[in-house]
Image (cartoon, coloured by chain):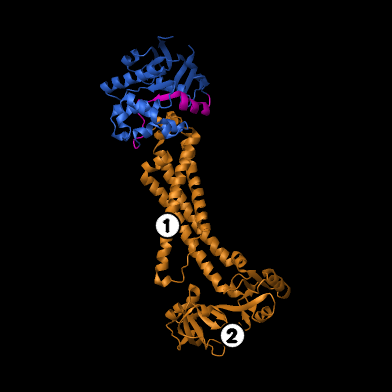
């Protein structure tokens, strides 16, 4: 009966499914986009390391101050393979209010992973003081290798231009760590230190050592960091809240559709009761119809979000910045929410339908 | 013979007691009995049928059908699934469904599969002359065909008791005769009990017993 009813009220079914589809598409797109952004930022931090060290209780890594002398200390420990400092900063450039700067050591592996489009890394050191531009940064700053670029109050020679996979890095400026520290008055400091563990070493060894020797700093495994870093949590929570709001609207559409569906076939429902349908069967039929509508909507919304994200990735200006991540967890979450929404949306119509008195309903005009 | 339907001192009112429709009605119908409830519109015929089927709850009194006291929801559901078939003045078939899909609704309600009801549906549809129309949507059928389809639907679960509320009231004269003949033939051939509400004295005369109602009471019962 469920499929028969949905089939013969195709428009109504389509409207209900569209509401859910838009909810699912919005949720998956928002969660996917923001999740992708978080993952991109995580990759900036990791740089082939297993752990991140930063200042305890800091709300934003841009405000974290870690002494760069820690790097040498850490590298002397047997459980550490290598340690790399990164200083994050924001600077202005002509016609560009926000440019992200990464202060790194020349030995940091992240530049070698990119494709060098112009120049090389010979002058990328504190003596040369040259900067390396991500491809997009070079584009919007209008600078080439060998030229000079104005960043904040300083002018810097451009050592080269690198195409990087990560959108944040590709739109940023890399400075030698010492140059970056001087430019932002953070001598002797960095924002984070990424730590690579020696073979067979445990992360707990780093944590214990940090707790003992640098109690104002914290060392977290990458996974742990992603889970607990407040900015990531805010972003992820925002994504789910926005998605849930979209679902609420979708849910209202399902409720509306199901109410219409019940009210427009009061006589039919009465006849079903006369034919032997129990109140439970009638309620299950309404819930079932709502669930099937939500299932159709979920798959349509999944497809819609996949197509939308694919289109976004194809826009040249957004390449590198958009890296949506829609995994099974997100899809399962959206499906569960869609099912809950469908059930909640069908509660009143099902209750109403089950309580119909057949004899009165048959007199209904 | 034992009573198939037993109605004892039944009172039923609407609008919070302001409109009294049944006023102490008593009726016993034996197995295989064919009873016509007659009377003018508003005398309480339809309400009495609804009370017998459990579609309306009584204010006072008792109703017993096929050995069941009609007192609660589960009894009513069980009666409507297995023991009672109902035919209305208007067919009340679902217009967007095929006649076959409509006929299978009682089978599904009783927990059976579509396949399990197919043989019976074809047999009844052939007997009522709508076998060739089963795949048609209800909206494509004539008035007589729809009412015959409703008759098939009411008999799908082989009920012992058939309640008919003006089953030919919406049909033209030729269809009225045909449908009523069919109804009597089917009921008699299967030994079923029929309680029929009608204001047509001609149809009432063809039944075994006539119960005349007036103003919520039984005025005359030629089988009493």
First to last magenta residue range: B71-96
Q: Which residue is mark 1?
A: A303
| A160 on left or right of A192 | left
Q: Residues within 10 Å of mark 1 (few under 14, many from 20)?
A: some
- Residue A271 located left or right of residue A192: left
The x and y percentages for residue B140 are: 29, 34
Q: Give the answer, above or below, for where A115 lies relative to A331.
A: below
For disc 2, the marked residue is A178
Mark 2 belongs to which subunit? A
Q: Residue furthest bottom?
A: A127
Q: Residues within 10 Å of mark 2 (few under 14, many from 20)?
A: many
Vertical comparison of B102 with B185: above or below: below
Residue B73 is inside the magenta segment: yes
Colour representing chain B: blue
Measuring from the top left, give residue A288's x and y in whole percent: 47, 42
Pointer 1 chain: A
User: Can the viewer see residue A360?
Assistant: yes
Q: Nearer the viewer, mark 1 or mark 2?
A: 1
Q: Would you identify the image quadrant in which residue B199 lies? A: top left
Answer with mark 1 or mark 2, whichever residue precedes in sequence.
2
Percent coordinates x, y for residue B39 in the rendering? 37, 16
Residue name at image x 30 percent, y 30 percent: B132
Residue B213: quadrant of the picture:
top left
What color is chain A drawn in? orange
Q: Secondary structure at mark 1?
A: helix
**Placement of A356 over or under B12, stated as above or below:** below
Residue A320 image offset from top left, x and y in percent: 46, 72
User: Is residue A187 highlighted in magenta?
Assistant: no
Residue nearest the observer in this picture, B99 or A341 = B99
Quarter in which the N terminus of chain A is drawn? top left
Label 2's element? helix
Real-space Cα distance between discs 1 and 2? 49 Å
């Amino acid at each position: 009966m469920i499929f028969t009813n949905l089939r013969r009220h195709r428009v109504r079914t389509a409207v209900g499914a569209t509401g859910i589809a838009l909810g699912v598409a919005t949720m998956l797109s928002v969660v996917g986009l923001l999740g992708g952004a978080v993952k991109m930022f995580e990759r900036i931090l990791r740089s082939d390391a297993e752990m991140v060290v930063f200042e305890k209780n800091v709300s934003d890594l841009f405000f974290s101050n870690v002494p760069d002398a820690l790097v040498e200390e850490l590298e002397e420990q047997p459980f550490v393979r290598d340690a790399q400092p990164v200083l994050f900063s924001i600077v202005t450039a002509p016609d560009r209010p926000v440019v992200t700067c990464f202060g790194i050591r020349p030995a940091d592996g992240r530049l070698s992973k990119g494709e060098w489009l112009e120049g090389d890394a010979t002058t990328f050191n504190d003596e040369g003081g040259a900067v390396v531009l991500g491809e997009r940064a070079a584009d919007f700053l209008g600078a080439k290798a060998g030229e000079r670029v104005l960043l904040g109050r300083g002018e810097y020679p451009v050592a080269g231009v690198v195409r990087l996979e990560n959108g944040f890095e590709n739109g940023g400026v890399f400075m030698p760590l010492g140059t970056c520290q001087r430019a932002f008055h953070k001598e002797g400091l960095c924002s984070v230190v990424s730590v690579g563990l020696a073979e067979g070493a445990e992360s707990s060894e780093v944590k214990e050592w940090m707790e003992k020797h640098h109690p104002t700093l914290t060392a977290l495994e990458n996974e742990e960091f992603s889970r607990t870093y407040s900015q990531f949590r805010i972003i992820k929570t925002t994504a789910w809240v926005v998605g849930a709001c979209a679902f609420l609207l979708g849910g209202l559409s399902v409720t509306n559709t199901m109410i219409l569906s019940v009210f427009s076939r009061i006589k039919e429902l009465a006849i079903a009761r006369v034919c032997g349908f129990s109140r439970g069967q009638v309620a299950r039929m309404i819930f079932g119809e709502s669930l099937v509508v939500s299932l159709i909507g979920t798959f349509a919304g999944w497809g819609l979000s996949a197509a939308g994200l694919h289109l976004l990735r194809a826009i040249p200006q957004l390449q590198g910045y958009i890296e949506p991540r829609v995994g099974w967890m997100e899809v399962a979450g959206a499906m569960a929410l869609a099912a809950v929404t469908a059930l909640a949306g069908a509660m009143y119509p099902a209750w109403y339908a089950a309580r119909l008195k057949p004899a009165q309903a048959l007199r209904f005009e | 013979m034992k009573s198939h339907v037993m109605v004892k001192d039944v009172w039923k009112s609407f609008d919070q007691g302001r409109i009294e429709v049944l006023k102490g009605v008593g009726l016993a119908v034996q197995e295989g009995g064919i009873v016509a409830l007659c009377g003018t519109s508003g005398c309480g015929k339809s309400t009495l049928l609804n009370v017998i089927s459990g579609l309306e709850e009584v204010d006072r009194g008792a109703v017993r059908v096929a050995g069941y006291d009609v007192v609660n929801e589960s009894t009513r559901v069980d009666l409507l699934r297995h023991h009672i078939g109902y035919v209305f003045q208007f067919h009340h078939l679902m217009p967007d469904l095929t006649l076959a899909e409509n006929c299978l609704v009682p089978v599904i309600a009783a927990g059976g599969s579509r396949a399990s009801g197919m043989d019976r549906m074809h047999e009844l549809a052939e007997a009522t002359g709508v076998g060739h129309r089963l795949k048609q949507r209800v909206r494509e059928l004539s008035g007589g065909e729809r009412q015959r389809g409703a008759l098939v639907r009411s008999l799908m679960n082989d009920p012992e008791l058939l309640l008919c509320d003006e089953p030919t009231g919406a049909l033209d004269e030729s269809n009225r005769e045909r449908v009523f003949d069919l109804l009597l033939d089917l009921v008699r051939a299967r030994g079923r009990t029929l309680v029929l509400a009608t204001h047509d004295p001609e149809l009432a005369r063809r039944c075994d017993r006539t119960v005349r109602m007036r103003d919520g009471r039984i005025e005359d019962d030629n089988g009493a």
